[in-house]
Image (cartoon, rainbow, N blue to C red):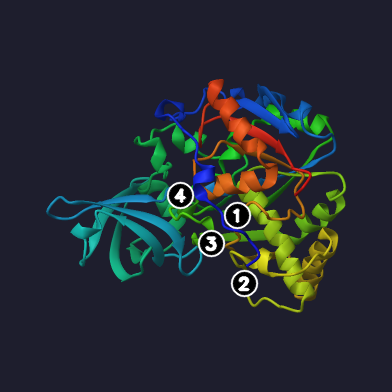
């Protein structure tokens, strides 16, 4: 692995509790925007984003949708058990029974036995039960059974579960979160955390971008709970990066090819992580590595693969593979960890929020923008910007050395 040690303390900054935005603003696009290009830092407002991005750029959005992943059960003795549903083991759309990877709150009170609760759906009572299957160091497999054989589990969650707000918000879910912790273009169920850079977009902002000649494309990366896990080791190279499911349409890749020379702007770190993963999937194909039913991009794969294919060649390799296999979409998992020293292949600018200290998201921003991230965050703190998921936004342009 060709990466020098990464001292995680270098990515620590003081974040006072009162700077964390615990609630969204009344209007999504009323948030502030910090524009960082070269050594320049300029404050603005998100509703004016179109005046700061290069005309004719392609913005890439993550159209995942946050599921109501938090389920509350009570044991007969009254103990409250929270089951945080992370990922189905047999895919989405299961009916009547499903096994999910979960995290369990108050797990010491539930070591065996069946948990049950009744759910009211349009006047119909549905009984939902949960039983323990197996445990690993990080997750617990839970089997769910419910009495309505026609209802998919993720639809049942809409009635039985609640939105999984980030732990650092440190508050209960409110009705408004059901709308505001989703992007306006959310489409595909699967995330347990929102791609928060997209929370600022409104129809008015989209229209202004279109008027500036920008185009929009969408991919799907289902965001996992690992996105909130801080780097707790002194050398970030020893951090185990979470894996997330990525789904890409062939039509999207064809459009991506057309815009490589015009400017690609991912909206959020999830979109950036996805775009760079597509490159490495193409690089693997060019090396004769054929994926099975699902592709996989490893955490350090970009740093160990000694390749320098042009982005267009790598993307075309994915398109050609999909044509050969008669695939309109391709699905897999990415565990890629983008840290300073990474060579970006596709992205030219990045729309993103302000991230937690010592997080993998901040490492990605530092890798893309360079040392200016420190000045940007210092400026934001000094000028009352709001931080984290419901906070303000940044527009970083790519550091020329990357």
Residue at the image point whose x is 51% and y is 66% from the top = 91
Task: Say which label, 3 or 2, has the lower sequence index.
Answer: 3
Dot 4 crowding, Cα within 10 Å, few <14, some 14–19, many 20+: some
Q: Can the viewer see residue 62?
A: no
208 vs 15, nearest the viewer: 15
Task: Say which label, 4 or 3, has the lower sequence index.
Answer: 4
Badge nearest the viewer, 1 or 4: 4
Q: Which residue is mark 4?
A: 230
Residue at the image point whose x is 64% and y is 30% from the top = 202
Which label is found at residue 160? none
- The image position of residue 187, as x and y in percent, is 60, 48
Left or right: 3 with respect to 348? left
Left or right: 83 with respect to 109? right
Which label is found at residue 243? 3
User: In which quadrant of the rendered view does residue 27 lie?
Assistant: top right
Which label is found at residue 294? 2
138 vs 247, nearest the viewer: 138
Which label is found at residue 221? 1
């Amino acid at each position: 692995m060709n990466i020098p040690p990464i001292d995680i303390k270098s990515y620590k900054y003081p974040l006072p509790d009162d700077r964390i935005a615990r609630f969204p603003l009344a209007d999504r696009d009323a948030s502030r925007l910090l524009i960082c290009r070269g050594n320049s830092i300029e404050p603005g407002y998100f509703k004016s984003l179109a005046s700061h991005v290069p005309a004719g750029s392609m913005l890439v959005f993550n159209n995942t949708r946050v599921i109501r992943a938090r389920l509350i059960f009570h044991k007969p003795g009254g103990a409250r058990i929270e089951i945080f549903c992370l990922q189905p083991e047999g895919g989405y759309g299961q009916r009547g029974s499903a096994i999910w990877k979960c995290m369990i709150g108050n797990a010491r009170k539930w070591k065996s036995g069946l948990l049950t609760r009744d759910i009211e759906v349009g006047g119909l009572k549905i009984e939902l039960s949960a039983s323990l299957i197996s445990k690993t160091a990080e997750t617990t497999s839970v089997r769910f059974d419910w009495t309505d054989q026609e209802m998919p589990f993720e639809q049942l969650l809409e009635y039985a579960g609640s939105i999984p707000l980030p732990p650092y918000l440190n508050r209960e879910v409110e009705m408004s979160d059901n709308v505001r912790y989703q992007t306006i273009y959310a489409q595909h169920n699967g995330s347990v955390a929102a791609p928060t850079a997209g929370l600022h977009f409104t129809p008015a902002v989209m229209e202004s971008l279109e008027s500036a000649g920008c185009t929009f494309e969408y991919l799907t990366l289902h965001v996992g709970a690992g996105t909130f896990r801080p780097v707790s080791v002194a050398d970030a190279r020893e951090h185990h990066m979470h894996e997330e499911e990525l789904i890409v349409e062939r039509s999207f890749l064809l459009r991506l090819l057309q815009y490589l020379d015009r400017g690609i702007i991912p909206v959020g770190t999830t979109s950036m992580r996805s775009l760079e993963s597509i490159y490495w999937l193409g690089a693997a194909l060019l090396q004769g590595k054929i994926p099975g039913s699902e592709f996989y991009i490893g955490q350090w794969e970009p740093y160990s693969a000694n390749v320098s294919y042009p982005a267009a060649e790598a993307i075309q390799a994915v398109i050609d593979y999909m044509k050969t296999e008669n695939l309109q979409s391709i699905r897999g998992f990415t565990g890629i960890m983008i840290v300073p020293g990474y060579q970006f292949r596709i992205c030219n600018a990045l729309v993103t929020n302000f991230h937690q200290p010592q997080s993998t998201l901040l490492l990605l921003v530092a890798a893309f923008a360079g040392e200016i991230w420190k000045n940007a965050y210092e400026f934001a703190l000094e000028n009352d910007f709001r931080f984290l998921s419901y906070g303000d936004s940044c527009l970083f342009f790519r550091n020329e050395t990357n």
